[in-house]
């Protein structure tokens, strides 16, 4: 439940197009406010693209969509220089990435070379073509979808690229009642009914407010202990990176902001920890033989690592 009035208006607009996925919508918006990128891993046809398009309308963002296939080239994403005979100069032509919200559809169906073209843009917010760097528009968000591992024509993203995504979500199939509502006519055409709630400057202002949310040192220590637990667990080969710990802090601040607070509670960390960590950890052979899932391992870590009993809190305020 979101108590921030402005944020709640945005979420209500997105819900016009995306039915029955309130938690996924809230966490997507929290990631946008935290300045991160979103990876959605799910089967085709459950509303991943609709979610991205609805947010682009509600937040007044210029958006572009690219369907990733094996023949997509890096230049299609970052742009290219072309020689103009009339002027005798090379002219830069924008790639699809030059927008506020870039939807990379089925990112794990294209080549590793093309996937890697996104790395600099996601991390630094700029593209480099023939030695010249150009900033992408602000704000800038990448929302990528990928089919489940093992699906036909897919290949796993490298750990270095997965780590660039702040969270990983799974929308899942709708329940019976929501699917009936969708069949009655609540479908992607309702994107046309989504109204703009924020402009780009207002969104940037909300992001700046999120950065100012207070995190007590004991809560930071709690996040550090959770990260260390993933690195020492018997079922995990690759634990949470330092970038993952930083993403946990940013997401917890955004989640607290959506709840109408200017300080982070340990509960905020717990609410977002699985989404931040699940795509970053790598289970070992022992875990696969025992049919242990990332969710089970992370749930165990959260239950074992003790939350701070007391810490400084800033006065609650309305936003």
Image (tube, rainbow, N blue to C red):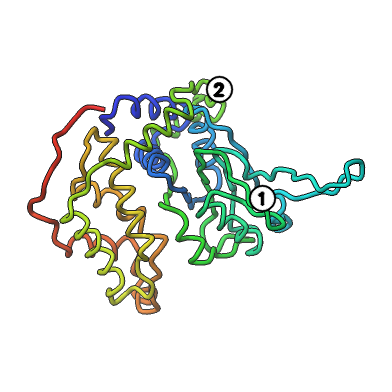
Residue drawn at (44%, 23%) of the image: 197
Percent x, y of residue 249: 30, 52
Q: Split into 4 quadrants, where in the image is the C terminus?
A: top left
Q: Is residue 262 left or right of residue 179?
A: left
- Badge 1 vs badge 2, beta-carbon distance below 8 Å: no
Q: Label 1 neighbourhood size at 10 Å, few (<14), some (14-19), many (20+)?
A: many
Percent x, y of residue 297: 29, 66
Q: Split into 4 quadrants, where in the image is the N terminus?
A: top left
Say which mark, if any, is on residue 78: 1
Q: Is residue 262 left or right of residue 248?
A: left
As helix, strand or loop, the secondary structure at mark 1 comes to helix
Q: Label 2 neighbourhood size at 10 Å, few (<14), some (14-19), many (20+)?
A: few
Q: Quadrant of residue 239?
A: bottom left
Residue drawn at (53%, 32%) of the image: 61
Say which mark, if any, is on residue 192: 2
Outermost residue to the left:
310
Front-most of residues 132 and 282: 132
Cα–Cα gap, marks 1 and 2 = 29 Å
The number of numbered discs placed on residues in the rendered structure image is 2
As helix, strand or loop, the secondary structure at mark 2 comes to helix
Mark yes or no: residue 94 visible. yes
Outermost residue to the bottom:
286
Residue drawn at (48%, 52%) of the image: 41
Q: Quadrant of residue 246?
A: bottom left
Which of the two discs, 1 and 2, sits closer to the camera?
A: 1
Say which mark, if any, is on residue 28: none
Front-most of residues 45 and 312: 312
Residue drawn at (52%, 42%) of the image: 140
Counting residues from the N terminus, which is met first, the one under dot 1 or under dot 2? 1
- The vertical placement of 32 against 74, above or below, is above
């Amino acid at each position: 439940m979101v108590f921030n009035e402005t944020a709640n208006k945005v979420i209500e607009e997105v819900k016009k197009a995306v039915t029955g996925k309130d938690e996924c919508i809230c966490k997507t918006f929290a990631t946008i406010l935290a300045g991160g990128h979103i990876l959605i891993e799910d089967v085709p046809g459950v509303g991943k693209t609709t979610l991205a398009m609805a947010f682009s309308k509600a937040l007044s963002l210029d958006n572009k969509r690219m369907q990733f296939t094996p023949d997509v080239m890096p230049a299609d994403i970052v742009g290219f220089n072309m020689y103009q005979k009339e002027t005798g100069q090379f002219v830069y032509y924008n790639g699809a990435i030059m927008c506020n919200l870039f939807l990379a559809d089925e990112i794990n169906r294209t080549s590793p070379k093309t996937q890697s073209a996104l790395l600099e843009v996601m991390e630094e917010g700029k593209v480099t073509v023939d030695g010249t760097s150009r900033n992408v528009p602000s704000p800038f968000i990448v929302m990528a979808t990928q089919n489940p591992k093992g699906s036909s024509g897919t290949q796993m993203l490298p750990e270095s690229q997965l780590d660039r995504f702040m969270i990983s979500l799974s929308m899942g199939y709708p329940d019976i009642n929501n699917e009936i509502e969708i069949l009655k006519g609540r479908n992607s055409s309702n994107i046309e009914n989504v109204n703009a709630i924020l402009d780009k400057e207002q969104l940037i202002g909300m992001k700046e407010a999120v950065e100012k949310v207070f995190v007590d040192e004991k809560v930071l220590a709690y996040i550090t202990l959770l990260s260390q637990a993933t690195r020492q667990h018997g079922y995990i080969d690759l634990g949470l990176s330092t970038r993952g710990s930083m993403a946990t802090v940013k997401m917890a601040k955004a989640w607290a902001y959506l709840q109408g607070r200017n300080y982070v509670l340990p509960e905020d960390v717990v609410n977002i920890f699985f989404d931040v960590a699940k795509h970053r950890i790598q289970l070992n052979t022992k875990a696969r033989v025992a049919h242990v899932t990332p969710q089970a391992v992370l749930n165990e870590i959260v239950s074992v690592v003790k939350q701070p009993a007391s810490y400084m809190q800033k006065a609650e305020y309305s936003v």
